[in-house]
Amino acid sequence: MNRKGSALSMKSFVFTLSCEDRPGIVAAVTTELADLGANIAESDQFWDQVTNRFFMRISFLAPDTLTRDAISKALAPAIARFDMKTELTDQSQRKKMIVMVSKFDHALLHILYQIRVGWMDAEVVAIVSNHEDSRRTAEIEGIPFHYWPVNKDNKAQQEDKLLGLVKETGADLVVLARYMQVLSDSLSKRLFGKVINIHHSFLPSFKGARPYHQAHERGVKMIGATAHYVTADLDEGPIIEQDAERVNHSLSANDFVARGRDIEARVLARAVKYHLENRVMIVGNKTIVFAR
């Protein structure tokens, strides 16, 4: 595709689609984009042979005079022809997120660092916690801090406050960075696809308290972490990213904890980045992730 205009006079968009697979889908979309003077920067696609569904993500540059509505209008005939489920995102609009944390702040700090150095393009509009431990971090970063302790009597009230904060800040995503409270079924359903959690192991995992100590007592040879979307079924949401590291008998339980925290922080950051860049498509109980 020929370039029309320099990158300095272009802005970035991401278009994702899913539909029944048949010939002509890619051509229909890319032809319309070419006619608009757009230049494709990245393209990924996947055909699920079991369901015969086709999935695609296209990142492209378009003249800065071209609006999102104009692009949507141009793509409308192709969308209707193939009965596509689509999303078009203007990447110049910086995504906003709320980070929720309890006492362990390693995942929160990693996200803040990755934003600071430019690897992750997002704005943390609020830090919410059921403990005071991260207040100082929020003050240093200039981020509003909300201390909302949770118990069985005020849980519904605190979740209503969270929904209000999402609306007030325009947050696109809520990140549970080792937030040690279970969200209610109602909240999980209302924010489906907009809440990412980090779990301290591969799923399924050791249940209950001190999971790394349980793993150590069982003599496991690998520990890991799983980032997933939150659903009403605890720790059963669509998985976005996972990683693991080999361990052995010579390591202490504290060594397990240290390595586990490092994995958790990395896995959560990657999952959040994939979501912010519209690289994740939820398909039932799983995801398709067009990762780089």
Image: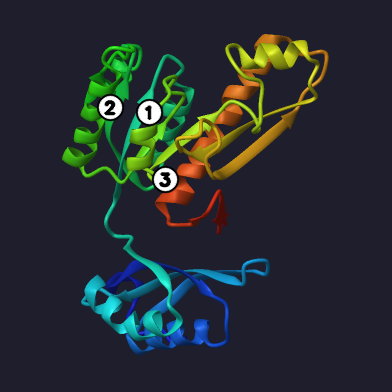
Q: Name the residue under label 1.
A: 184
| 260 over 244 or under it: above or below | above
Position of residue 56 in the picture relative to residue 225 (left or right): left
Disc 3 residue type? Met
Q: Earlier in the sequence, mark 1 or mark 3?
A: 3
Q: Residues within 10 Å of mark 2 (few under 14, many from 20)?
A: some
- CA gap between label 3 and label 2 equals 27 Å
Q: Mark 2 points at which residue?
A: 159
Kind of residue indicated by mark 1: Ser
- The mark nearer the N terminus, 1 or 2, is 2
Residue situated in front as seen by the camera: 262 or 119:
262
**Can you tell which quarter of the image residue 272 is in?**
top left
Name the side, left or right, on which 228 lies relative to 140: right
Q: Distance between the residues labelled 1 and 3?
A: 29 Å
Q: Do the residues labelled 1 and 2 touch (CB within 8 Å)?
A: yes
- Residue 73 horizontal/vertical position (percent): 27, 80
Whether residue 25 is situated above or below residue 136 in the rendered picture? below
**Towards the viewer: 91 or 158:** 158
Q: How far apart, in angstroms, are the residues tagged by discs 1 and 2? A: 8 Å
The answer to whether residue 128 shows anywhere in this view is: yes
Q: Do callouts 1 and 3 mark residues in contact (Cβ within 8 Å)?
A: no
**Type of amino acid under label 2:** Glu
Quadrant hosting residue 90: bottom left
The disc, 3 or 2, on the residue closer to the chain's N-terminal end is 3
Q: Which residue is drawn at the image coordinates 72% and 31% (left, top)?
A: 245
Residue furthest left as drawn: 168
Q: Position of residue 97 (x, y in %)?
A: 32, 40
SS type, badge 1: loop
Q: Residue at x 39, y 79 (%)?
A: 79
- Tell me, for residue 120, which label it has, or none: 3
Q: Do the residues labelled 3 and 2 touch (CB within 8 Å)?
A: no
92 and 163: which is toward the camera: 163
